[in-house]
Image (cartoon, coloured by chain):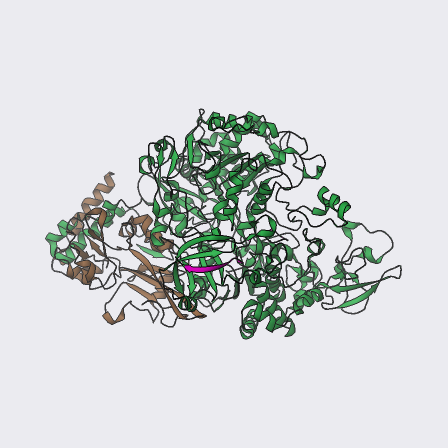
Amino acid sequence: MSFVDGRYVERGKTLSRRVLFKLAAAASGAVAFGTVSARAAMDWLDPRRIQKAASTTRDDGVKVIHSVCLGCNTRCGNRAVVKDGRLELMSGNPYHSYNHLANPISYATPVQETLGLASPVCGKAQAAPQYLYNPYRILKPLKRSGPRGAGKFEPIEWDQLIAEIVDGGRPFAGLGEDREVKGLKALDTDDLIDPKAPELGSVRNTFVFMTGRLQSGRKEIIDRFVKSSFGSKNRVGHTDICGLGFRMGNWAFTGQKEVELKADPWGAEYILVFGANVYEGLQPGINVYAAALANRHSKGQVKFTIVDPRAQNASCHAEDWIPVKPGQDGAFAMAMIRWILENGRYNKEFLAAPNGEAAKKHGNACHSNATHLVITEKDHPAYGKFLRLSDLLQEKVDPKKDPYQVFPAAGKDPVDSSKVDTAVLDAEASVKTASGASIAVKTAFRLMKEGVMERTLQEYAELSGVPVEKIEKTAREFVSHGTKAAVCQYHGAGNYAGGTHAAYAVAILNALVGSVDRMGGYNKSGGGAAKWDKGLYDLKSFPGKKKPGGVMISREKAAYEKSSEYKKKKEETGSGYPAKRPWFPFSKGGLSTETLSGIDQQYPYGCNILVTYFFNPVYSIPGGYRFVETLKDPQKVPLHISVDTGINESNLYADYIVPDITYLEGHYGWLNPHAPTLKFTGVRTPCVEPLTGKTKDGRPFSLETFLVDLAERAKLPGFGAKAMPGKDGQEYPLHTAEDFYMRAIANIGFNAKVPAAPEPEVAFVERNYPVAKHRALLNDDQWKKACFVLARGGVFKKYDDLFDGEMHKYGIKKVYLYNEKLAQARNSLTGERFSGTLKYTPPVDSKGKVIEKADQGYPFFMVTYKMHVHTQSRTTSHRWAMEVVPENFVNMCAADAAELGLKTGDAVRLISPSNADGIVGKVQVTNLVRRGCLGVSFHYGHSQLGASELSIKNAESVMLGGKEVAKKDRLLADKSLGTGLNPNMVSRLDEGLANTPLVDVIGGIPDFSSTRVKVIRA
Amino acid sequence: MSERRKFLKKSGLLAILGLAGLAAGDRKAEASNVEQWAMIIDLNRCTGCQSCVIACKAQNKTAPGKFNTRIITEEEGTYPQSRILFTPVQCNQCEDPPCVAACPEHATFQLPNGIVVTDWNKCTSKGDCVPACPYEARFLDPRHGGKSDKCDFCINRLNQGLMPACVEACSEKARLFGDMKNPQGEFAEYLARSGLVTRKPDLKLKTRVRYVPSSKSVKGGVL
């Protein structure tokens, strides 16, 4: 036998491997001790037999399932080995681009030939059995049996749970709480929240559904319920804490089309890493991006530099580490831009192409608006907007075909941007209209340049804490790789107040080298490989579907100036400003922090019912501890239901906890790639049967069953009988999860135009996959095509097929050096306009105070990060991860530790202006964090998820671990689940805004980087 | 058990008993008939992600807090010219293993394919092999009477035609594995390289685990 690049080549194809093993064992004994020993050694006892090693894909009687991981949100493929109904082992999916350096096996390969192939996944993915069989999982619905947060619960019947939530009433009268709770039914009305402010929408919006770790599949069924069926606008994601800062930069850069773009790690020569923890965190994470970087680094194919207050694990292979000051990525990027401009090292060909056709002539898939003219005439009604043909003519122009204007290379009069192949990049002028008026204009490039030139290199060096030489060296390197250089920016590159403009500067670096949409350049995701919602079944439309209206409680994507509050204030005071809290017209949205702050302040309206799904905001939001008082208050949160697998720091305050299944038992989904580059649709189906309890008709307690039963009891449309129209003219019921998801998978098979799976593959799916039980939901042809997809865990496209020459086929196509929508938006607290292009913006609070200055009595910045073996708040159950890293630390620069007389292991208390009690952790002295900064990881410092004792009636029957974790009515604590510290517990609050967590006023970005702390010995 | 398998087992046994050369201790003759497994770890690829460490745990269910493979993490350089170094370590499957010599019960021995294994029928938990290993690759399993454990290149998996768990889990392919007698693909390319090193070279042990030092590190790794 031998291996070729991870693939096993069989020599004696029919020889049982177990026999081979015994042969080897016997022979070995012979070598060492002669024939007598040889006979004895034939039966040598291998430790793995005693230790009960996990079954493999090659063991008899196992089931093998290809699915998609949710150890983190990367979406790698996984391959489960299930023995006797129990998940034993997890590896990767050989068909999946994310498991194989973007070069997996051919999609056509028969599945039977793949089971011996090596396919990697990371440690989080491999911890799946520990996540699934976490003894602290709950199996039954729980209802609060004491005051909120007292940690007292009792199991209740499923039907009672549904009835109490739909019907409302006085469910807590037994606890002495005589208040009337409005159920879902009471909110199912088109009555306005406030007739004096009709723009806020109907009472439906007071039903707020917040989603933590959400992915496609469940996202669609939750949206169906909350938005289309119930009609609330408030299905709120958590993009803000996921990393809204860098996304806002890309949002501005792409004209609000895209939030994620990254350097293509499979093709780049040089990558500048801004705040992306490339060897530990990131999406796609360590199994994908890190793997590509490291593998290609070893061959000398790619170099990278890290710009981050922490050197990170990637420092092992990095060309250089630039320990930038927290919150100052923008200053560093603008310094680089200044150097590039002054030295003429930008890609003029790329930037001067004013339209897509012109770009194509130079072999580019993308063009920029660098040459487009912007009206800078202060009194002009379109001040700050692009100059369009209609601005120059007297006659009307169709607003949909109103071309941007540029200066042609020859001649002074502006022309339509579509009419020339190249235009003037750096100019300002006064243009004459047909009526003879003149309008002052500048090119977008000029405006950007002016923003950059406001500060000298030396000033940027001081602001960013990076010496001028280092800035110059990095800039020179960045422009020395043609279009094979790009930025990989992530969470850290803008996760603070002011982050929008910081990350915008980082994004523009890619335009300056012209690498956007190019192989090895700055790429968006190639997107999904097949649609899920149309084709054989229409999974989005249904009779009675609602279209939610009004303003989200987070005020995202809503203009304050259109509100009744603004109009009233303007009438009363002459100025409509300030708003009570910021509004976020330009934000990408997903503002969980501002949703909770809105709920706390009952602004712009109050919440009646809050559902939190797979979400732990008290732990996960910087400053989330502030929301304990919100969640405790029945006036602010009259009814709180959590859907989750266990009891965490947030649903400890819930009225009801609905037990959910994990991604190993459900979470059907169709998972498209993150940026950069790739194109696929991974398909997740269960690996094992659900472990939770069941309804009377046999459906598992889970999110889907919960939503279906709420909808059916409340008589909402889109669920129950005749909920989903088929192409065949029939209407299909939606009563189980599979009713919905199986049809989505059928659509994917149909739209991907896959062949019917050959018989051995159908047999493979039917023998191994729990989903095969539901095959009768589809007809034979649909099922066989679904089997082709299921056997492979999705539909995957090859890297090489995603490019036309060097041009990414699925690129963004246009980028913006000036964004007029951003320029038109206003700060709702001051009424000031935001800059539509680059502008240095330090982290400030809502009053405009520079935080670094305001908090200078606290000498250290605290920055936070994720670790390789963990995911957010939810992985303390991963016992192997906890073996490898039993606790986290306060990472402190050696020079700082020496000054304070601290050494590794010393206990210290971190105190912030917002949390005087602080948090306690152990110091780890290092040279891998910037001086004056502390690095503290997430994942640790839990008080729940098993770390504390709780009162749960009949706890032994409620918890998956039974007696292992419970004794009668007590849930027993395991202190090893509560080690370390959670940095979010001291994050900066904004005293100017009701002491809620600090956010950026443009995007609503929660601030992970500006908190300053004192360190005292504990 | 299928008839075919029974037959194979029987013929296998006959084959063993027919291996007369073995009794005479003709190790080379035997070795020529079996694979010679070896691993090369490229520190220019290892990201320190711990996937291999957890893969080993997930597959082999070693004792809590004990590891058949782990990653040594060290810092190098002075701030801010500093970087981290990752060096995966495990049993090096020595050609002349000090642990074998230290075991009075002959419970630990080397297979013809080069893998050093421990027979738990014979292991008396005395633990002499643990300090004898210069690579700190051995430990006693407290769950099972303190019997000695260590990496065996996932011999169970090899015999199923599968890569060792740690090798499979390494997405950046820092761990290359194969048969030195019949090397294939990238493993063959690596095997042919000059500059492969053994950990603790002063000991002058020949090992089946070798390293490509990190080009970015001054000392190449924790070698």
Q: Position of residue A405 (x, y in %)?
A: 77, 60
Is residue B26 covered in magenta? no
Q: Is residue A970 left or right of residue A231?
A: left
Q: Is residue A114 left or right of residue A407?
A: left
Of residues A844 and A48, the one drawn nearer to the viewer in this rendering = A844
Asked if residue A776 is positioned above or below residue A416 in the image, the reply reads above
Q: Name which quarter of the figure residue A252 lies in.
A: bottom right
Q: Which residues are magenta?
A: A1002-1016
Q: Is residue A69 left or right of residue A844?
A: left
Q: Is residue A531 left or right of residue A915?
A: right
Predominant SS of the magenta segment? loop
Q: Is residue A493 in view from this perspective? A: yes
Asked if residue A148 is positioned above or below residue B69 in the image, the reply reads above
Viewport quadrant of the C terminus of chain B: bottom left
Viewport quadrant of the N terminus of chain B: top left
Q: Is residue A805 in view from this perspective? A: no
Q: Position of residue A414 (x, y in %)?
A: 80, 63
Image mark count: 0
Of residues B158 and B204, the one drawn nearer to the viewer in this rendering = B204
Q: Position of residue A403 (x, y in %)?
A: 77, 56
Rendered residue at 46%/68% (across/down): A300
Asked if residue A900 is positioned above or below residue A532 in the image, the reply reads below
Of residues A856 and A924, the one drawn nearer to the viewer in this rendering = A856
Q: Position of residue B219 (x, y in %)?
A: 35, 72
Of all residues shown, which one is farthest toward the left? Answer: A36
Is residue A1014 covered in magenta? yes
Of all residues shown, which one is farthest toward the right? Answer: A435
For the colour brown, the matching chain is B
For the colour green, the matching chain is A
Q: Name which quarter of the figure residue B38 lies in.
A: bottom left
Rendered residue at 48%/25% (across/down): A160
